[in-house]
Amino acid sequence: MIDYWIAVRDNIAARSRHGAAPVSGPRPAGINIRQAAVFKRLEAEVRRIDLDGPAAVDWSKVNALSLNILSNQSKDMLVAAWATYGLFRVEGYEGLAVGFGVLRGMVETYWEELFPSIGRHGARAGAVDWLVHLGPPLVAHEPIEADASAVIAAWDALDGLARGLSAKLTNGQVALEVLFRALQPHYERANEAIASAAEHAAVEAMQAAGQG
C-alpha cells in the first residue's frame, strides 16, 4: 500500500503543475475567454447544477473543457474552481488534490495576471466562494484506505491555497473554512493510516533482517 500511496502522490504532483505552467504565447496567463464559445459551453454545462443538481452535469465534459482552457487559453479562477469540483466528482480525492493544486499554482504564479482581472476583487472572491459547493459531498464521501495519500495531498494543496490567498483576498475565505472543516476528519484518519502502515512496514523489515 505504501508504494501505491507514493505513486498516487507523485501523479498528483505532476498533474498539479499545470496550474503554474504558462499558456503558450506572449501572455503566460493567457487571455480573458469569458466571451468565447468554449467558455459559454462550459458555463452552460456547469449551470445545470443550479436547476437539477450535480448529477445532471456531465462532469467529464466539464473537466475536459476546463483543463484545456487552463492549459492552453486562460488562467481563470472560476474555470479552475469548476474543474476542482468536476475532478472530485469523477476521480474522488485524487482529483480533488489535483484541482486544489492547479488553483494553488495559478494563485502563487499568476496573481497579477490571472482572470478575473486583479481589479475585480469581488469576482475573484466569487470564484473562490463557488468552491463551497464541495462542502456537502466532502462530508458525505468517506475516503477508503487507498485514498490516504490523496486526502493528505488535497489538504496540503488547500492549505497552500489558503495561505496564498490570505494576504491577497480578504473575501472568499469562508468557503475555504467550510472545506477545511469537511476535510479535517478525513485528513486525520489518513495520517493515522499512513503512520500505521509505516510502523507495520518497519516491524516487518526488522523481522526480515533478524531472520537473515
Image (spheres, helix red, strand yellow):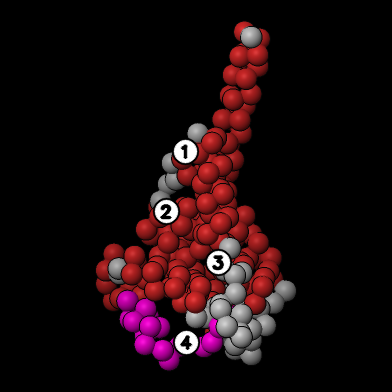
Mark 4 residue type? Ile
Q: Position of residue 98 (x, y in %)?
A: 51, 59
Q: Position of residue 124 (x, y in %)?
A: 57, 81
Q: Give the CA separation, mark 4 to mark 3.
A: 18 Å
Mark 1 / mark 3, whichever is N-terminal: 3
From mark 2 to mark 1, how far is it between C-alphas? 13 Å
- The circle on residue 92 is 2
Q: Circle 1 — which element?
A: helix
Badge 2 or badge 3: first in the primary sequence:
3
Query: From mark 4 to mark 1, how far is it between C-alphas?
Result: 40 Å
Whole-percent x, y for residue 194 in the image: 57, 36
Task: Judge by depth and name the residue closer to the eye, 195 or 70.
Answer: 70
Q: Is residue 54 visible?
A: no
Is the Cβ of the residue at disc 4 closer than 8 Å to that at disc 3? no
In the image, farthest residue toward the front:
25
Quarter residue 173 falls in: bottom right
Query: What residue do we see at 43% from left, 91% from top?
Result: 35
Residue 208 quadrant: top right
- The residue that mark 3 highlights is 18
Residue at which label 4 appears = 33
For the residues marked 4 and 2, what is the alpha-carbon distance in whole angstroms?
28 Å
Q: To which residue does mark 1 refer?
A: 145
User: Which region of the structure is painted magenta?
Assistant: 29-45
On whether residue 39 falls in the magenta region, the answer is yes
Question: How many C-alpha atoms fall within 10 Å of the one at disc 2: few (<14), some, or many (≥20)?
Answer: some
Most foreground residue, 137 or 28: 28
